[in-house]
Structure formats: C-alpha cells, structure tokens
Amino acid sequence: MSTGKRKTKSPKCIADLPTLKAAAPLVLPSFDERRPIILRGIHSDVLDGRAFADIELSLYTRRTKDKKPYNYRTLHANKQLLLAASPKFTTIFRRDEAGASSPEECISDDSDAEDDVEEEASLSDEDISVASGCMDADVDECCSNEVSKHVADPKTKDFLPSNPESVQNAPATGVLVRNGAFRTWKAVISYLYDTQDRIIFRPLTSESWTKAKTNAEEPSDPLACSPKSVYKLAHQLNLVTLMNRAKAEIESNLTSDNIVEELFSDFTWRYPEIIAMEVNVYSKHSTDPRVLDAFNKAIDQCATGKFPHSPTIIKSIVHMLAHRDTSLSEPWASAWS
C-alpha cells in the first residue's frame, strides 16, 4: 500500500548535482564616483562646526648639500578623502613606521633639487657653491614667514642653519612623512580634492632655461610641481591615473636636447615604465648629432663611475637596438665606437 510519500532520486554522480552559478564579484565604486559624496559629507560636517582638516603631515621643504632634509612645514589634510583615494595612505599616517626609508634615501633622487641654483643666478660663485643642492625642487618659495626660522637671506652666511644635523630631524607638528617634499604633497592632495583633477606641472630642469622662463603658468601657480616628483609619489601611493599623467608630461618635454640627460638621471632607472618610454623617445632621436654627442659623453662618464646605475639603461638601449627592424646606421656605429 502506497504511503503517499514521493521518493526523491539521489544523484548517481557529481555530474548529476545542480550547478551553482558563481556570484558576480563585488565591484566597489571608484574614487572618482565616491569623491563628490565624501566631499558633500565633509562640507556638512564643516557647516556643523567641525574642521575640514583632521590630520597634520610634517614635510621637509629644503635639504642640505649632503641630502639632509630640514625646514619642515605642516600640511593640513582630510584623512577620509586621502584614504578613499588610496589605502596606501594608511602606512603613511603611521608615525615612525618600522622599516620606513630614511629621509636621506628618499630625497636623494628628487628630480629638481638644482632649480634654486638657477633662481639665484645673480649670486657670486661662492654663494652658489653654498646654495647648490641645498633646496628641494618642490619647495614653496612664497612663504618666508612660515618656512622656518633657519632660513635667512641667501646672500649671508646664515643661508643654511649653522648645524643642519640639529634641525634635520626636528619636524613640525603632525605625522612625519619621509617620502616627498612639501610642494609635491600639497599639489597631489589638491589634485585629489579637485573633482576636475587639475594639476599644473613645472618644466623639467633639463629643459632650457629660456623655455622655462616662457612658461607662463609655472612661476605664478603656487601648486605647480615637478612631474618626476609627482610620478614618484603617485607610484608609492598607487595612484595610477596620476602616474600616467605625470609620465605623459615627462614624455612631452623630452627632446633631442635633454633625452640623454634624462635617460641617465637618478630618477629614470628606478621605474621600468619610464625606462621603456624614454628609450623609445631616444630611438626616435638617435641619429641627431646632439644626441650622439651627448650619448658619447655619457658613456665616457659611465666609465668613470658617474652613473652607477647606467647598466640598466644601457641594457635597455641595446635591447631596443636588437629588436629594431632596421640595421645599425652609420651614426649608430660611430656612437658605439
């Protein structure tokens, strides 16, 4: 007699089991999508009496000839916005994080540390020898009352602190940031705040002074910054869009006059994408007499140890030559002779 219960058929093998569809991966909104919402919430808090800036970053503005940072300034920022832009800001906000690079190591390859020598061209040779290399390229020159009590008239012996060692590790209030200068951070944070992603780049120091003087935006914009310094900081923070913009800016300023200097700079060898881009630009100008002459001089300087990281660059150039469709031209042959 039937009990009325229906027997279910058990699967004979795994293939008979019902197939479960994998859930679609969760895609978080991008920073560009979240930024207006975050800003609106912050503005609401400000209207309620809260401060916009809730974190202080202590950043150097100058350095001595032996790469010691000093003249720290405090940059005020909004932590929520920065963390939304990149989780890597979390490690930056940890004061004295174990394993962090030393200040000297971080600024030794800053791209425009020589700019102030050109700006002080009216000084005597003795004054210039003191000033050379003392200041970081991304230095805010418009804040004489705020920069530091250690900065005096560059024509006097008080241009540098009497004992730089005593002030290099004496930051202003806030989290001590070891990577990047005050001007660079100020420009990058302003870019992250700006819903139109505006940023103004300064000329490369390898460009001619005449061209730099004709750049109307550079001297007047307080947020103008070095594309190399921005690329370096964006790379650390994994800000890919900003990295690409800085890279494009560097590429747009490469010419026959400065491509060799840029190739062998202390900046280029650190980033494979920059090496590839600059080697490509170099290949387009490789037969220009100015490039050939500069390249021969650079090779001679490599032999004397001036460019300790030159093998990385030379290998990339040789690799490019090996994969070019055309054979070595006569100018190239002379370049390697």
Image (cartoon, rainbow, N blue to C red):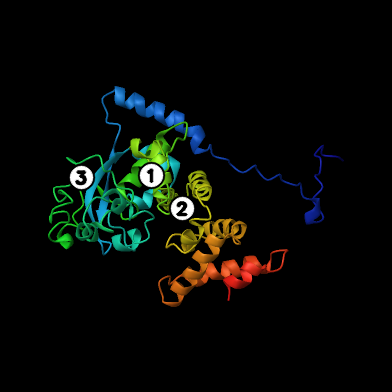
Callout in the foreground (2, 3): 3
Contact, mark 2 vs mark 3 (Cβ under 8 Å) = no
Mark 1: amino acid: Cys
Q: Residue 151: x and y, percent?
A: 17, 49
Residue position for label 1: 225
- Image coordinates of residue 55 in percent, x first then y, are 28, 41
Mark 1 / mark 3, whichever is N-terminal? 3
Toward the right, the furthest residue is 1
- Residue, far top: 47
- Label 3, secondary structure: give it: loop
Residue at coordinates 23% horizontally, 59% vertically from top-left? Answer: 125
Of labels 2 and 3, earlier in sequence is 3
Neighbor class of circle 3 (other Cα within 10 Å; few <14, some 14-19, many 20+) is some
Which numbered disc flags the more N-terminal residue, 1 or 2? 1
Pointer 1 and pointer 3: residues touching (CB < 8 Å)? no
According to the picture, the residue beneath numbered tag 3 turns out to be 147
Q: Is residue 109 above or below residue 87?
A: below
Residue 48: mark: none
Of the pair 12 and 153, the residue shown nearer to us: 153
> Which sits in the foreground, 111 or 173?
111
How many callouts does the rendering have? 3
Q: Which mark is residue 235?
A: 2
Q: Is residue 100 above or below residue 25?
A: below
Whether residue 330 is visible to the viewer of this picture, yes or no, is yes
Q: CA distance from mark 2 to mark 3?
A: 27 Å
